[in-house]
Amino acid sequence: MLQNQQCYSHPRRKRLSKLKQINLSFRFPASSRSLFLFLLLAAGYSMGTDSANVSFYLDEIDRIEASSNAFDPQLGETYMSLGKSLIDDGNFPEAQDALKRGVQIERINFGLHSLSQTPHLMLLADLEYVLGNNKEAQKALENVYSIASNHYGSKDARMLPVLDQLLSWQTDRYQNISSKGDFDHVIAAEVTALRIAKVIDSSVPMKDPRVPNYFHKLAAVQYLIANHIKRHGLPTDVGFEFTTGNSVKAASPSAATHTYYRRGKAALLSRIDSIIQQENINLLTQASAIAELADWYLIFGQRQQAGSAYQVAFDTLKSEEISDQERDEFFALPRKIDFPFDESLRPIGDSNLEVSLWITETGRARDIEILNPPDDLTKEDWKTVRSGLMKTRFRPRLIEGLPEAIAHTLLYPIPKRDVSEQG
């Protein structure tokens, strides 16, 4: 662990010229740069002209080491600040060194499993990811989990915020560039979901108001995995391994998909149970949860079970607390079936097409037509829109709890084109 302590040994002025050389010679795809900058801004890191100067932190490190030693506790935070400044300058390899040095100092001063090293490791994971070192990024994240589980206990409720952060890291990156080669994010999300389930089962009562949202997330993970397998099949090599032994090892995509169907169904049933046990039962929330279970049945081809669940959802609203108008409007229009990780973030793009279509009683899109299409909409764009809607499943309109076909109008994002295609 002490082998790298010479990483920033003085004199540090020699490092500055090297930093400039790296800044000129280091290159990576523009899309990765944009994604990385977005991630840093989202995390609240300082960027742009207001960032601190690299030289300032190098001088600060010299000062602290001269007055104390190379492992002074102040140096952990200083190396973190140095790493952020190096990121701002585009010197990512040097930022890696600074962050690793900060981790080392935190461990020496506060212990191998000190929580203080977590921010260094999270930022280091971002760096490794952008540099194409996904295996190293996953190791940094697994280190974050190991530190927290050793500090709190793997089934302690205080693990939930940590697991939330790790799950968001995986799903954000998968959703940004989902492709056949990104199954490692899928597996990592599955492992994290299993860990969340163990914490809830062991340490969090069903009446806890946080529980319904966590069960929703667990179902969303299963939906993500099943969708990935449907599009890309099962990979032969995911590039890294977790040692939990809980990942599905199925002989075929259909067998794996069925496993994730069962897991998602169980999570949604538990979500309904948890909502019922809340102190103040909201019937609209309860009906929505039952309807999402029906959605789950529908997208996995269980039409009879879906119909029964939709009827239960509708009947749940037959109460004096809910007006006839509220009940009828709740299921009056079709709704795209989706299981996002954050229910408040169902995005609608800035540029959309108005699309007219017919939603069948089984939630299929038919008779698709783009209303007032823009002049620059190509035949390929139209094919993309039509293909996307044909693959989309909708919750059908319900009349007295029974599905009914209906004409519908919705907004659909204009297909993105490559920069080269835009001339």
Image (cartoon, helix red, strand yellow):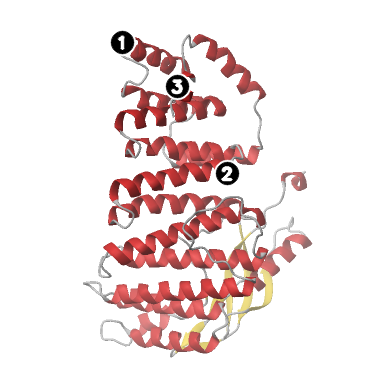
SS label for mark 1: helix
Quadrant in the rendering for residue 16: top right
Which residue is disc 1 drawn over?
67
Q: Residue at x 50, y 25 (%)?
A: 86
Residue 112 in the image: above or below residue 148: above
Mark carried by residue 218: none
> Is 171 on the left-hand or right-hand side of 227?
left
Residue type at mark 3 is Gln
Dots 2, 1 in contact, CB < 8 A? no
Residue type at mark 1 is Ser
SS label for mark 3: helix
In this rendering, the label closer to the viewer, 2 or 3: 3
Does residue 409 appear in the picture of this structure?
no
Nearer-N-terminus badge (2/3): 3
Q: Quadrant of the C terminus?
A: top right
Report crowding for label 3: few under 14, some 14 to 19, many 20 or more residues within 10 A (C-alpha).
some
Which residue is disc 3 drawn over?
5
Nearer-N-terminus badge (3/1): 3
Residue located farthest toward the left when viewing the structure as drawn: 279
Q: Residue 145 appears at what percent x and percent y?
A: 40, 48
